Amino acid sequence: MTESIRLINPAARESALKKAGYNLFAVRAEDVYIDLLTDSGTGAMSQEQWAAIMRGDESYAGARSYHRLRSVVEDIFGFKYFVPTHQGRAAENILAACLVKPGQYVPSNMHFDTTDANIRARGGRPVNLVIDEAYDPANTHPFKGNMDIAKLNSFIKETGAENIPFGMVTVTNNAGGGQPVSLENLKAVADVYHSFDLPFFIDAARYAENAFFIKLREPGYSSKSVKEIAREMFALADGMTMSAKKDAIVNIGGLLCMNDGILFENVKNELILREGFPTYGGLAGRDLDAMAVGLYEGLDEDYLTYRLGQTAYLVAIINEAGIATIQPAGGHAVYLDAASVLPHIPQSEFPGQALCVELYRQGAIRGVEIGSVMFAHSDPETGKIVYPKLELLRLAIPRRTYTQSHMDYVADTLKHIKNRASTIHGYKFTYAPELLRHFTAQFEPL
Ligand SMILES: Cc1ncc(COP(=O)(O)O)c(C=O)c1O
């Protein structure tokens, strides 16, 4: 699949920004030159996936497409039960609807925004217990997505296991820089959850990238295949949610897997209400077939070598341009430390959003803020605004889509912005919804 891209002129970019209320989600895709908004659903599907789409069985119940997907899901993940969903947040919604009660807490290394919001939407409280190194952008810990085991233990003791419906871990940790979690850490997390009789769910959106990092970085795994490592990861858990739009390289799809038969019954009822019959779960048969093929392609080690290599290359050239990024390079994206590029803009004026707008203004490149726009919230007890520890701009790299020259253009654009950083101003909201506000918020320059 190829697609032409066009670079509109600076005046047209300025008017696109104004029209969009300075929110890049509201800019038309055709007005974007290099689109690094997300790696979710934006990968290029292979000829095998397109061929599989033509084989899609659109029967309402028990379609061949479902059974093909089921055998792949069983082979890779090994859980007893699964349902397809239309994307990751639908799996999270159903899990939260079945398990979370108002006032309960759900710990994780770091919840991604949709997981965070789905727990809050049920009256629950997401809790992030990642290791402290994750909050130090320059720290080169090889597994910065790891959970802080001591913090997890004392959190469960203080909160009481009866107030925690389940525990999670996100692999790789998207909200914290696409950083991996080691198998040693996953084992320790599983031990803690299980010692308190808590079910353990993995947010598996980028499990293949995480498994490849384990192969590359964790002693004892270099001769194991990525698939074997993945099996070891999931054997520790009681279930998983997954957005298939990442490591299954499809444009739409998700999975919810579990071992608990009673939970599965409840999940099926919720699924029928919100998504569809359990053998299609909000997807067409052809989508299930594309996912079945993509799940194996996402585990291909030549592809993963190129994929992680491209991210590492972009990190290296951005750093050469004098701009700090989260270290070491993560899997799917580069996270620019907006707070250090624009130190004169306080968190209340959204430095990540300001950098995001400048990248479009300068080069028609689209990224996304992962900072106060996304995560600042008022504390339910004190009413005070709680700011996140990091103010980041994320440049997510679609799978099998861009080449090295596209990456070079991104680094060149950033060099120009760095040279005029002190002239860049912050932003204020003119509109912001309560949940997931970064998608639809509107801004005004200060
Ligand atoms: C770690 C993680 N979990 C969950 C999701 C939600 O998935 P979806 O966008 O398919 O709803 C995402 C999406 O970006 C993610 O990165």
Image (cartoon, grey):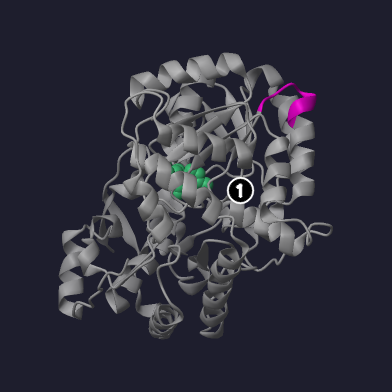
Residue 255 image position (x, y, % from top left):
49, 36
Q: Residue 303's image quarter?
A: bottom right
Mark 1 surroundings within 10 Å by alpha-carbon count, few (fewer than 14), some (14 through 19), many (20 or more): many
**Does the rendering let one see residue 284?**
yes
**Does the rendering let one see residue 141?**
no
Q: Residue 7's image quarter?
A: bottom left
Residue 110 image position (x, y, % from top left):
59, 45
Q: Is residue 44 left or right of residue 440?
A: right
Say which of 440 and 236 sits in front.
236
Find out whether residue 323 is within the magenta segment.
no
Say which of 88 and 66 sits in front.
66
Q: Which residue does the image show at 48% across and 67% down from the upper left?
A: 338
Magenta residues? 193-199
Amino acid on which disc 1 is placed: Val
Q: Quadrant of the N terminus?
A: bottom left
Residue 63 image position (x, y, % from top left):
39, 29
Q: Quadrant of the C terminus?
A: bottom left
Residue 210 image position (x, y, % from top left):
64, 54
- Compared to residue 45, the image places residue 74 above or below, namely above
- Compared to residue 64, the image places residue 343 above or below, namely below
Q: Which residue does the image show at 55% across and 42% down from the upper left?
A: 111
Callout 1 secondary element:
loop
